[in-house]
Amino acid sequence: MKPESLALLKKVSTATLATALFKRGFRQQYIQNVQPLRVHAESMVGPAFTLRYIPAREDLNTIDVFRDPTHPQRRGIEECPPGHVMVIDSRKDARAASAGGILVNRLQARGVAGVVTDGGFRDAQEIAGLRIWAFHQRPSAPTNLTLNHAVALNEPIACGDAPIFPGDIMVGDGDGVIALPAHLADELADEATEMTAYEDFATERVRHGHTIRGLYPATDMANLALFNAWRKTHDR
């Protein structure tokens, strides 16, 4: 992804990107049932670095596991590259926490762009006060070891029913998180930026009493002419 695309994606919504993906036949890129602990000024954007859990087996998931420096969760916290988004497949199960405040603080300190799980976080209020984007299903106090067994880093996962491949471009905002196939990220950034400009124009028109007929979607050429004039006056 070009640096220019990253900057553009920080200013477009996941809703707009979902429509752009739907035009291309993609229907399952939106992560279901996750929400941000805090909404930041710009959207979260970064390549996916993945962690996958399977159901825990009691003889393998004792508290002593956390003493192992090669444990995939511990490794992931230290290996997720700066600017990336750590995406955790917790099997859509929020009964046990995917991570907590100390680990998310470490991700923030290392320059990671965000962390997403379809499970839950412990220390949710603490994480909500951090600068890093963090998305989960709901707060959860029990350690992940009670239900989940970490098995793989940086492999394809399913997070909230969305297929996530390492390097996919994750975009998150107040509505949730969507995964852009990496090879489409640049063109989606350009298209979503254009779509956003028109949506802002249409919103302004509607607020001034204009009907949506012919405006949204733009089926009346007169509205396109008005849009082009609007772009000039708004430097869009």
Image (tube, helix red, strand yellow):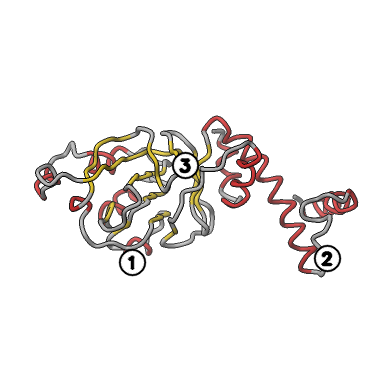
**Residue visible at 58% across and 33% down in the picture:** 184
**Residue visible at 28% across and 40% down in the picture:** 76
Total of numbered circles in the picture? 3
Q: Going from the N terminus, do you reach mark 1 or mark 2 first?
A: 1
Would you call the spot at circle 3 few (<14 residues within 10 Å), some (14-19), or many (20 or more)? many
Q: Is residue 42 left or right of residue 226?
A: left
SS for tag 3?
Answer: strand
Foreground: 47 or 216? 216
Relative image position of residue 115 (x, y in whole percent): 38, 49
In the picture of the structure, the residue carrying the numbered disc 2 is 210
Q: Which mark is residue 46?
A: 3
Mark 1 vs mark 3, CA separation in Å = 24 Å
Foreground: 53 or 196? 53
Q: Is residue 97 left or right of residue 224?
A: left
Mark 3 vs mark 2, CA separation in Å = 38 Å
Q: Is residue 213 left or right of residue 19?
A: right
Would you call the spot at circle 1 few (<14 residues within 10 Å), some (14-19), or many (20 or more)? few
In the picture of the structure, the residue carrying the numbered disc 1 is 125
Say which of marks 1 and 2 sits in front: 2
Q: Quadrant of residue 150?
A: top left
Q: Going from the N terminus, do you reach mark 1 or mark 3 first?
A: 3
Relative image position of residue 127 (x, y in whole percent): 34, 60
Mark 1 vs mark 2, CA separation in Å = 43 Å
Q: Which mark is residue 170?
A: none
Q: Quadrant of the N terminus?
A: top right
**Residue visible at 54% across and 54% down in the picture:** 42
Q: Identify the amino acid type marked 2.
A: His
Q: Identify the amino acid type marked 1.
A: Gln
Relative image position of residue 166 (x, y in whole percent): 41, 34
Q: Identify the amino acid type marked 3.
A: Gly
